[in-house]
Amino acid sequence: MTCPVCRKPLGRNKNACSMACYSALRSNKKVCVVCDQSFYAPPSSDTKTCSTECSSENRRRKTYLKDNLALAHEKLPTHPLTGRFDTHMHAKEWVIQSPTGEIFKCRNLQNWLRENSHMYDGTLTQAVDGIMKIKYSAQGKRKKKVSQWKGWRLLEWSD
Ligand SMILES: [Zn+2]
Ligand SMILES: [Zn+2]
């Protein structure tokens, strides 16, 4: 066993070879992100793992996460225009909220409603009409204002 701070033999001591090393150990203690064990890391070091095994495990997890994240992006509703997930902040799109509070975004409202007809009660025409009435109400174009259609709400839209 060697001192985790200075790498000298520990001798009969348990954690560090000397009081100085012990206090360094205590003040620079980190918790391994992989195995939750505490370990000594010099203040200049940005290591997050206690050992080379944990370090490679951590790297493996990171690439796994990255792959999953890429996959999650692929699973996001794709836009009919680009076929890709669009991160453009000001992309014009429809944002609607289901009766259960879920929020959906789409480029083409009619297409979306056609593809997701199992999510609402009624025909496609009724759904489009219902959402359009909310839009016209918000624009002040309707005398009889409506704010929802069968629990569905329109949060934003493109023109
Ligand atoms: Zn030491
Ligand atoms: Zn570890």
Image (cartoon, rainbow, N blue to C red):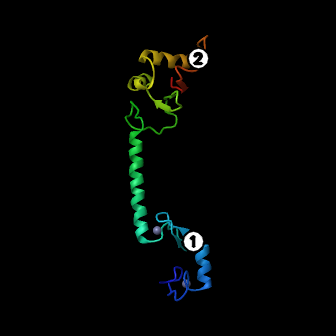
| Residue at (38, 51) in percent of width and height | 67
The residue at the point 52 percent across, 34 percent down is: 90
How packed mark 2 is, by other alpha carbons closer than 10 Å (few <14, some 14-19, many 20 or more), is: some
What is the secondary structure assignment of the residue under circle 2? loop
Q: Where is residue 91 in the image (x, y as percent from the top left)?
A: 49, 33
What residue is rendered at 62% in x and 83% in y? 20
In the figure, residue 78 lies in which quadrant? top left
Which of the two residues, 75 or 34, is positioned nearer the viewer here? 34
**Residue 92 image offset from top left, x and y in percent:** 49, 29
Q: Residue 152, image x and y in percent?
A: 52, 24
Residue at the extreme top:
143
- The residue singled out by tag 1 in the image is 29
Q: In the visual, does 88 lie left or right of 115?
A: right
Disc 1 versus disc 2: distance between alpha carbons? 60 Å
* Residue at numbered disc 2: 146
Helix or strand or loop: what does disc 1 sit on?
Answer: strand
Q: Nearer the viewer, residue 142 or 60?
A: 60
